Image: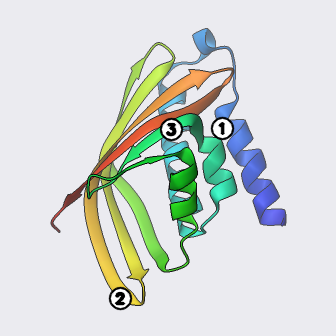
Amino acid sequence: MRAAFCLLIFLTWLSAGPVRGQQNFSDETSKLMALENAWNQAQIRHDSKSLARLVSDQFIYTDTDGSVMDKSRFLADNEDADYSASVMVNDNVKVYSYPNTAVVAGRYHAKGTYKGKPFDHYGRFTDTWIYLNGIWQCVASHTTALGK
């Protein structure tokens, strides 16, 4: 419970901040990178409550198999006990900033088990974030599988 409370405080601190005009590019980039890392940790822990705060109500996700999910389906999928990731990391991440919008693109590595069978996936992701009402939220995410 204490860890969840600390994570909530941390995410609130990251998503809040000074007036947009006062933030510099480096601050925004750091904040978005931290939000992406918090997303990975929420997926590892099956923490849909934390994940729900990171994605907008109109969130849309396109998975590696071409399936499309809205926020409720994405959060339900995150709670699948058959999926157990032990590694979920990003690299080669770039942030492209626009007024009240950012596109974060990079490579991910996910490793764990699904229905008792090991997996080791690599892929690319593109997340579109908007800054609205004082917080960053992801409105769209797309992943593409890669070979090792």
Task: Give me the C-alpha separation between circle 3 and circle 1.
Answer: 20 Å
Secondary structure found at label 2: strand
Residue 118 picture location, percent across and down:
34, 85
Residue 67 picture location, percent across and down:
32, 53
| Residue at the (77%, 60%) spot, across then down | 4
Name the residue furthest top. 21
Upstream in sequence: badge 1 or badge 2:
1
The label shown at residue 59 is 3
58 or 97, which lies in front? Answer: 58
Q: Quadrant of residue 44?
A: bottom right
Secondary structure found at label 3: strand
Task: Give me the C-alpha separation between circle 1 and circle 2.
Answer: 36 Å
Tell me if mark 2 has few (under 14), some (14-19) or many (20+) residues whose alpha carbon lies within 10 angstroms of its own: few
Q: Are marks 3 and 2 in contact (CB under 8 Å)?
A: no
Residue 53 picture location, percent across and down:
66, 43
| Residue at the (61%, 14%) spot, across then down | 20
| Residue at the (69%, 25%) spot, across then down | 17
Decide if residue 29 is on the left or right side of residue 19: left
| Residue at the (72%, 54%) spot, across then down | 7
Question: Is 34 above or below relative to 24?
Answer: below
Mark toward the viewer: 1 or 2: 2
Three-letter code for the amino acid on which mark 2 is drawn: Lys
103 or 56, which lies in front? Answer: 56
Question: Is 94 above or below relative to 91?
Answer: above
Three-letter code for the amino acid on which mark 1 is drawn: Leu
Q: Quadrant of residue 27?
A: top right
Three-letter code for the amino acid on which mark 3 is drawn: Phe
Q: Is residue 93 visible?
A: no
